[in-house]
Amino acid sequence: MARVDLQGLHKVWDTATAVDGLDLTINDGEFVAILGPSGCGKSTTLFMLAGVYLPTAGDILFDGARINEVEARDRNVGIVFQSYALYPNMTVLQNILFPLRFQKHPDADQRARDMADLVQVGDLLDRRPGQLSGGQQQRVALARALVKRPNLLLLDEPLSNLDATLRLTMRAEIRRITRELGVTTILVTHDQLEATTMADRVVCMNAGRIEQVGTAEDLYLRPQSRFVAGFIGSPPINFIEGSVTGGALRCDGQTIAVAAPDGPVCIGLRPELLIPVEDGLAAKVTHVEAMGREVLTSVETAFGTLRFLEPTARPRWRIGDDLQLGFAPDASIVFGAAGTRLDGATAALKKVIHA
Amino acid sequence: MASVDWNALAAKSRRSRRWKNGLLIGFLTLVSVPILLPFFWMVVISVTARTGGVEAAVLWLACAVLVPATCAYGAAHLALPHPRARIIAGGVIAAAAALGLWALVGDQLHLHNYRFLVNSNLVEDIRGAATAGGQFPWVWTAFGNSLLVASVSTALKVIVATLAGYYLSRFAFRGRSGFLQGLLILEVFHPWMLTIPIFLVIYWVGLLNTLTGPILVLTAIDLPFFIFIMKGFFDAVPWDIEMSAMTDGASRRQAFRMVVLPQVRAGLIAIAVLGFIKGWEEYVFVTALRTGNSYWVMSTYLYYVAEDVMGVDYGLVAAVSVFYMIPSLALYLWCQRYLTQMTMGGVKG
């Protein structure tokens, strides 16, 4: 178990910068998720932590000691790959024993069996990986990564090859096991649900940089950049873009009051915080999606297409209906031209403001 | 829709399927006859011919038994889906064929043509004085040399192709794509075109008239293709398995040996079999790289038996051929499964 520090971490390939200055501290025993779209540098970061890639610049510290040049096999890091990367020529037991073969443990066999029991594959020890289901392979990969009691557990999109039901169970399972062992864990994923449900803290990355670090709630309710606001949340947040003049956005006779200096802004509005009201922004329904628990309605307004979510199973609107939309001022998140959040700035409909 | 007779349509489909199958099998049988007959004849001649010539009647009688037996085996294979039933049918047909042969040509069978296996001085036996410079060897000497050439060159090919294939598959280095293209371009030139330059090189290096010469040349000729095959196999091994082994505590070499190599086993066996058979069959370079009769291998032995020493003793030639064929045939049959996998691995590359 270890505390992990990343200090100004860079990774530059021949032509492209994959990781562009990462500063992050992960506490001992903490479960941190690195979340971002493909190509944001999250896997590169993971492989630098594992010792597969050498950082171009910056330092990696385990418990305060710089380990940049320490080889992968000496770092005592466990890793679970997206494909599980089990050794097909070995049985489950041999797979779990593999990391212990290089450490000469007197009780290696017993430890491997205990670990197999912990991840509940104790009765599959003589099978080969090819004879296991996806979930079982996942458990074996986890046991193999944990059997040597690693300083750090790295999970690279561990759930993306599982079906939806299994994903749900494995999410809880992985969390239970890492908590039981108290191992520092870094999960890399592009799936926001995976990140927000499992991790103590989520690191949202984009284009090689950290956009925001925080709890799931922080990222959802208080996104610090337009990217985070757009990336977190499903269905995605609505954006209204425009230029503020005299404290308002105007278009086709409709007005949104914006408490921000003049200039280009982008207003983010979560779909569940947009509500049909008596007197608000005129909108025409263009598409209705019943999703079971809620209904997602797309409307065309003067400020572009917006989508709002209603917590009902039965659609209230039909295509072509006219309605008015409103939102509370504290529901809006205003971003400046650079995509960063403007602190203190809010937006409101001039006419409808209800407390 | 009421008047459609589904049963009649199904019967029609069954009839046409049967016809098509029958035609296909008939055609395939027909074209395989000229390919298989020489093998039959070779075996039959080797156990029937006496000094001086071949009895045509014996040949035809033997074919009258063997051809129907082969066809029967094919038919049994088609009719019986169960593997055990197939084996039993094969045994029954083989027994029937053996009985038929015994009844028709049994009195003609003899093993005298195989005397070369026990007689170390075949030439003296037949002609008195030696023909081929008095150095015509015992067959086991040639057999041993062939084994040596084939196995040493195979070992070299497998080792070099495996390491090179792995490196090409896993590492980026300057000139990698050029190297890969170069491997392909080398395949364009038939090695026989290079016989004279190769002869000169071997002469200058001082390996003329040694077995080391053909061993090195055969290795060099096969390597480009084999490297390519092995690269394909390594490409098919996921990268993360290796990385996983290395984070598990293995060195790169340990990861290669314990995790990667077991997964390219089929490729190793495939190139080993191909390489061995090529070395076993080699004639051109073993002939070109010796100036006298400094060494003998099976192919030159067979050639001299056929052309130089014996002239017309077809029985002996056939017997040597059968003896020559058995090791590569056995190896091929034994490893057939892996050879078919090779094409798949190759395509992936």
Image (cartoon, helix red, strand yellow):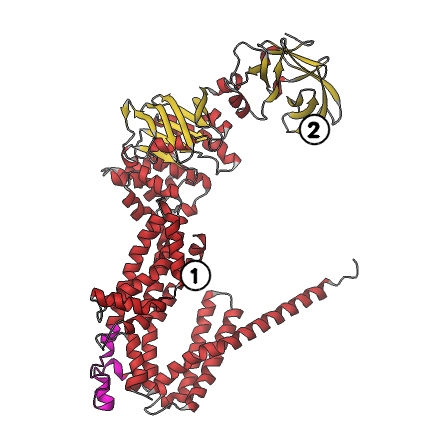
Q: CA distance from mark 1 to mark 2?
A: 55 Å
Left-right relation of B74 to B178: right
Query: Taking B81 as reference, is A50 above or below it?
Result: above
Q: Are tags 1 and 2 found on a single chain?
A: no
Chain holding disc 2: A
Is residue B50 shown in magenta? Answer: no
Residue occupying the point 49% across, 65% down: B82
Along the viewing direction, whichever of A95 and A4 lies nearer the viewer:
A4
Residue A277 numbered mark, or none: none
Residue A194 in picture, x, y percent from top left: 48, 29
Q: Residues within 10 Å of mark 1 (few under 14, many from 20)?
A: few
Residue occupying the point 35% across, 86% down: B314
Residue B340 numbered mark, or none: 1
Tell which residue pokes out farthest to the top in this image. A355
Q: Quadrant of residue B315?
A: bottom left
Q: Quadrant of the N terminus of chain B?
A: bottom right
What is the three-letter code of the residue carrying label 2?
His
Query: Taking B155 as reference, is B302 above or below it?
Result: below
The region drawn magenta spans B115-143
Residue A13 in picture, x, y percent from top left: 39, 35
Can see residue B109?
no
Left-right relation of A159 to B251: right
Residue B281 in picture, x, y percent from top left: 33, 71
Left-right relation of A55 to A215: left
Residue A287 numbered mark, or none: 2
What is the three-letter code of the residue carrying label 1?
Thr
Along the viewing direction, whichever of B31 and B156 lies nearer the viewer:
B156
Residue occupying the point 68% across, 10% down: A352
Query: Taking B236 as reference, is B141 above or below it?
Result: below
